[in-house]
Amino acid sequence: MGTDPRPVRADARRNRLRILEAAEAVFAEQGASASTEAVAARAGIAVGTVFRHFPTKPDLLKAVVMNLQDGLVADADALVGDAGDVEALFAFCSRVLAIGAGNREVFARLAETGTRVHVGDALGRLRPAVDLLLERAQGAGAVRGDLRPEELVALLAAVCQEAMTAGWDEPFRLRALEVLFDGIRARA
């Protein structure tokens, strides 16, 4: 006989989502060393509720990262659903870099706890969408035909990792994307 966990109540799901949204905003504004109390205040709930969902700060940080990845998966799926957009691949790459750079402090704090987040691994969850976006961009003649998906993922992961490690500002990130996109565009 299996032991099915009790279903999560709707209010508990809403609280968890509010905590994650608040944590992402608080950590983006104040850095990953921001207090759990600040997250609770932003979410409009008691700090005990935060600890019921996330017993430790590293648990909360990991959940924020997983939520960010889930958001990227949803973004990628939406871009894949828009079959006519040849610029979808570039929009996706831009989104990945913005999320990585915007949450640099979260990734750094996780590393301090011994949890390493590798951009390439995170992009692995997105691989089916990346493959399809690349295939469409190549089919439309917007991207080099010889670019392989694993090459694109490696290039994007390297740019994101360096942007997070070095703390690139937005103009530098945009310039790096411009250079990356110029390199993968189809030649006339």
Image (cartoon, grey):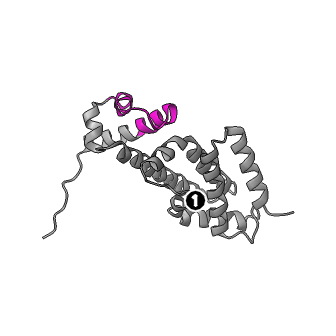
Label 1: which residue?
A: 80
**Magenta segment, which residues?**
21-44
The quarter of the displayed image where residue 34 is located: top left
Badge 1 element:
helix
Amino acid bearing label 1:
Val
Which of 103 and 187 lies nearest the eye of the viewer? Answer: 103
> In the rendered view of the protein, which quadrant contains the N terminus?
bottom left
| Magenta-span inclusion, residue 31 | yes
What residue is at 72 percent from the left and 66 percent from the top? 138
SS assignment for the magenta stretch, majority: helix
Which of 120 and 93 lies nearest the eye of the viewer? Answer: 120
Which of 25 and 118 lies nearest the eye of the viewer? Answer: 118
Farthest residue toward the right?
188
Q: Is residue 108 above or below residue 4?
A: above
Where is residue 50 drawn, in percent x and y? 30, 38
Q: Is residue 4 above or below residue 172?
A: below
* Residue 8 shown left or right of residue 44 in the figure: left
What residue is at 60 percent from the left and 66 percent from the top? 132
The quarter of the displayed image where residue 180 is located: bottom right
Where is residue 79 drawn, in percent x and y? 58, 55
